[in-house]
Image (tube, helix red, strand yellow):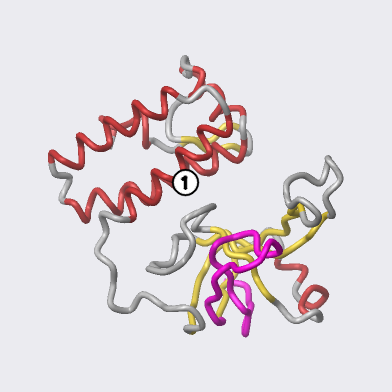
Amino acid sequence: MRRTALLFCIFSVGAHAASFDCTKASSVSEKLICTTPALSQADDRLAKVYREAKTASGNSSEFRQMTKENWRLRQQCQTVSCLSDWYTHSQQKYLQLMPLSAACPDENSEVNATGTLLRITFPGPPNYESVEQGDEAEVYWVLQADKPLCTQDAADWGDQTQMQLVVEAGMYKTHRSLIGHRVRVQGSLLFAETGHHHTPLMIGVGKLEAE
């Protein structure tokens, strides 16, 4: 893996994580990744998906060429928005190299997932774009999953490893101590349908517990 350090070595600077040494960042894209927490975290998640895709492909010459060309696309990005889109598309690209399991869940299937429980504020009505610009704030619990679920019919936007949790009202009080900690979630898989659904995949929670 050291040969791919420019793209997939993991390190930490403060609370940030990225796949290259930020002390040696030289391009605009690398500096943006190092100074933007959301991009640094996306970089860390992509590294995990990359490793799985590399194994699934047998690290073929085609895979190595695709990785090289994809990295060049990242270097062309000059804005946070461009890089955010690059991470989303790159993750989807590598996921497509992995064989779909016959056990991939459909909507309403029972699923089990592990990860970190987050409390995230999203922009709501009227425009679902920016709380700072007047949109209503919508606060939801979100599972930052260890790995994306394999699905064939979910929307292809957003971060496939973040899943908004649909919980009973009482859980916000009884389980609030779990925020920021690793958890295991059991429930029904749901697909986003409305503007109030801020992640492409969601889980209707039946059981939420510390891992």
Start and end of the magenta stretch?
187-211
Is residue 28 rendered magenta in the image? no
Q: Image quarter for residue 141?
A: bottom right
Q: Residue at x 53, y 35 (%)?
A: 12
Q: Which residue is mark 1?
A: 88
**Vertically, is 211 above or below 33?**
below
Q: Residue at x 37, y 68 (%)?
A: 152
127 left or right of 34?
A: right
Residue 118, image x, y percentages:
67, 59
Q: Residue at x 28, y 52 (%)?
A: 53
Q: Which residue, as the protein is rendered here, is positioned at the far left?
A: 61
Amino acid beneath label 1: Thr
Residue 171, image x, y percentages:
76, 78
Residue 160, image x, y percentages:
49, 57
Q: Image quarter for residue 63?
A: top left
Q: Which residue, as the protein is rendered here, is positioned at the far front?
A: 126
Q: Residue at x 70, y 67 (%)?
A: 178
65 left or right of 173?
A: left
Name the quadrant of the C terminus.
Answer: bottom right
> Which of these two is toward me, 44 or 75?
75
> Which of these two is toward me, 206 or 133?
133
Residue 181, image x, y percentages:
65, 62
**Vertically, is 192 above or below 33?**
below
